[in-house]
Image (cartoon, helix red, strand yellow):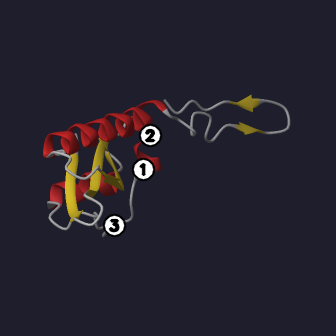
C-alpha cells in the first residue's frame, strides 16, 4: 500500500513559529522488512487509520518526525513549501539509500553467496 498521506502537521509552536510534523514515504518492496514496525506500533499522528498503521507495521510505509521553524511573519504557504521539500528529501532517502544491499551475504569457508536486496 502506498502512503495515504505524505505530510501531517502536528503541533504548532507559536514561540518559534514552527511546526512538529510527520512524514510518510513509500518503501521499495525488497526493503520493506527492514522498515517493518512491531505489531501494535503507534504513529506519531494520533489519527492514523488502521490501514495506515498496517502499512507502517508491514514496512510498506516509513515514518519520520521532525520540527521546522520559520521566520516571524512567515506565511502558511512558506510552511507548506518547506514541508513538501522535507517530504521530497525523505522519500528520496527511503527510495535511494540502501544500507542492506548485501544483507545476508555469506561465506562458508570456500565460496561466497552474495545477496542483493534491491
In the figure, residue 51 lies in which quadrant? bottom left
Q: Identify the mark at residue 39; answer none if there is no mark.
A: 3
Give the SS element for disc 2.
helix
Give the SS element for disc 3.
loop
On-image quarter of the N terminus: top left
Q: Identify the mark at residue 31; answer none if there is no mark.
A: 2
- Mark 1 to mark 3: distance in Å? 13 Å
- Mark 2 to mark 3: distance in Å? 18 Å
Q: Residue at x 47, y 48 (%)?
A: 34
Q: Residue at x 30, y 40 (%)?
A: 87
Q: Residue 41: x percent and y percent?
A: 32, 66
The one of 35 and 84 positioned closer to us in this rendering? 84
| Count of numbered badges drawn on the protein | 3
- Mark 1 to mark 2: distance in Å? 7 Å
* Residue annotated with mark 1: 35
Give the SS element for disc 1.
helix
Whether residue 34 sits left or right of residue 42 in the image: it is right
Amino acid at each position: 500500500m502506498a502512503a495515504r498521506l505524505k505530510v501531517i502537521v502536528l503541533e504548532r509552536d507559536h514561540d518559534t513559529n514552527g511546526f512538529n510534523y510527520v512524514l510518510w514515504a513509500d518503501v521499495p518492496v525488497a526493503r520493506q522488512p527492514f522498515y517493518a514496525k512491531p505489531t501494535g506500533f503507534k504513529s506519531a499522528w494520533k489519527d492514523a487509520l488502521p490501514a495506515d498503521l498496517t502499512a507502517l507495521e508491514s514496512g510498506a510505509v516509513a515514518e519520520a518526525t521532525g520540527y521546522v521553524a520559520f521566520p516571524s511573519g512567515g506565511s502558511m504557504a512558506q510552511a507548506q513549501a518547506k514541508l513538501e521539500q522535507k517530504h521530497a528529501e525523505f522519500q528520496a532517502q527511503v527510495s535511494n539509500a540502501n544500507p542492506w544491499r548485501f544483507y545476508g551475504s555469506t561465506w562458508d569457508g570456500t565460496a561466497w553467496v552474495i545477496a542483493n536486496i534491491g
